[in-house]
Image: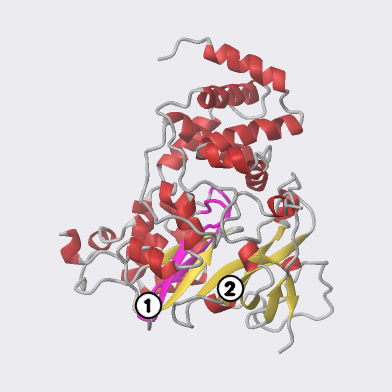
Amino acid sequence: MRDNTTPAGNPLTGIVFAEGERPVFGPGDKARILARSPIGHYRVPTYMRGKLCTVEKVIEPAAVDNEEEAFGRNVGSKRHYYRVAVPMSEIWPEYKGPATDGLRIEIYETWLERVST
Amino acid sequence: MSAHDHSSPHSEPAAPQHGGDYEIMETAVRELLVEKKLIGPGEIRRQIEVLDSRSPALGAKVVARAWNDPGFKVRLLENGRRACEELGISFYDDTQLIVLENTATVHNLVVCTLCSCYPRPVLGLPPDWYKVKPYRARAVSEPRKVLEEFGTHIPDDVEIRVSDSTALVRFLVLPMRPEGTEGYTEEQLAALVTRDAMIGVVTANTPTESA
Amino acid sequence: MPDTYQFVKRLPNDIGGLQADTVQQTDHVLLPWEKRCHALADVLDFHKIINTEEKRRGVEALGAELVGKLSYYERWIVAFANILFEKRILSPTELALKMDEVAARPRD
């Protein structure tokens, strides 16, 4: 699979990217989904809050924060979503199925915090 | 947070045979928006035609093409939307598409716990059960039990991957090609692919099942 | 004190992982007005009059009781009306008068 985070060929040097233009996380990065509780609108389900995850894929293109979009903001600064993997046993301690079972979900950049391993 | 629910219904209230006050409201809102020239008079009719042109038959063609054309399958798994566009399927709702391949070791299942995100450009509108509480609440916490309720048994040595659709991306499951379909044409293969197989709640039909 | 804040911070549609019944494989062919309502949602999003995320927020803002009692497209059309009021595109009386006018038409 092509990795969208790495430009093909030899990239030119000296280019400065706009805030939020480049993804902060990449495939394989460990992160924690934050455990905050916004009201009004959100797209991070309660059951995923605070869980450790592994970034699987950067979702292109970058997008406006859906929490702001929900109140009519259609343009503005954009950041990336990341498809992250979380084992079922991390989400549901009492999960009865095989340890390999897992969940995938797209999380907006502002909801992820890097975890050093 | 208590585990028992305080808010949502156990089942969807059945829609009445006509919309009553809600149908009147829909007509009134639409006509007011047209009178104010915020939407064009033919736009709703046109969008209904768009919706009517999308059904699981499109998704089945995508799957059948992937089964018969290894190059297409590679492109489909790399960028689902672009590969579908190659076949002329437009993404009118501006979503992206990730195609999830089922294999001998991985079974994918798609759900939207927060609402009813669904790959509408490729599959049409979702069935009612996809939009109501039992499936949405349980597919993420006890997927194997939910699959059993659809008559699907996934052995323990096969990993279950549940994708909870929450943002811009929609998901289409690429089921495993059934045995005994060597030499099948795309049309014959497409006939084995059901909507539910592309959501991941069942496997593709075998030639005997659909005979 | 009862913990009422849980009802504020958990939106009515945030149901992943809650206990629920066995899945019944229900479906129905959309009624003509339901399909028009779906097409309306798409067109409102195309023009960014009401984007898809605003529609979702509008449904959640109906609150748990209405979300539980209304059917899928009933929730949508009521949410659209409320959002159009908020945006001052429609006024409540304007919509009420138009609804009276529509209701007075002969039904086919």
Task: Determine whether A58 is above or below A69 in the image.
Answer: below
User: Which amino acid does the dot numbered 1 rest on?
Assistant: Thr
Chain letter of disc 2?
A
User: Residue A97's spot in the image, x, y percent?
Assistant: 44, 77
Q: Would you say residue B89 is visible in this rendering?
A: no
Residue B186 appearing in the image: yes
Q: Is residue A83 above or below residue B136?
A: below
Image check: C91 left or right of C31? Answer: right
- Give how far across and how far down residue A111 sits, in percent: 73, 67
Residue at the spot of label 1: B103
Q: Secondary structure at mark 1?
A: loop
* Amino acid of disc 2: Ile
- Circle 2 SS class: helix
User: Is C45 in front, or is C23?
Assistant: C23
In the depicted view, which residue is nearer to us: C34 or B183? C34
Disc 1: host chain: B
Q: Residue at x 68, y 22 (%)?
A: B36
> Residue drawn at (53%, 36%), measured in percent from left and top?
C70
Instruction: From the image, tell me which residue sits under label 2.
Output: A91
Q: Are marks 2 and 1 on the same chain?
A: no
Query: Is A3 contained in the magenta span?
Result: no
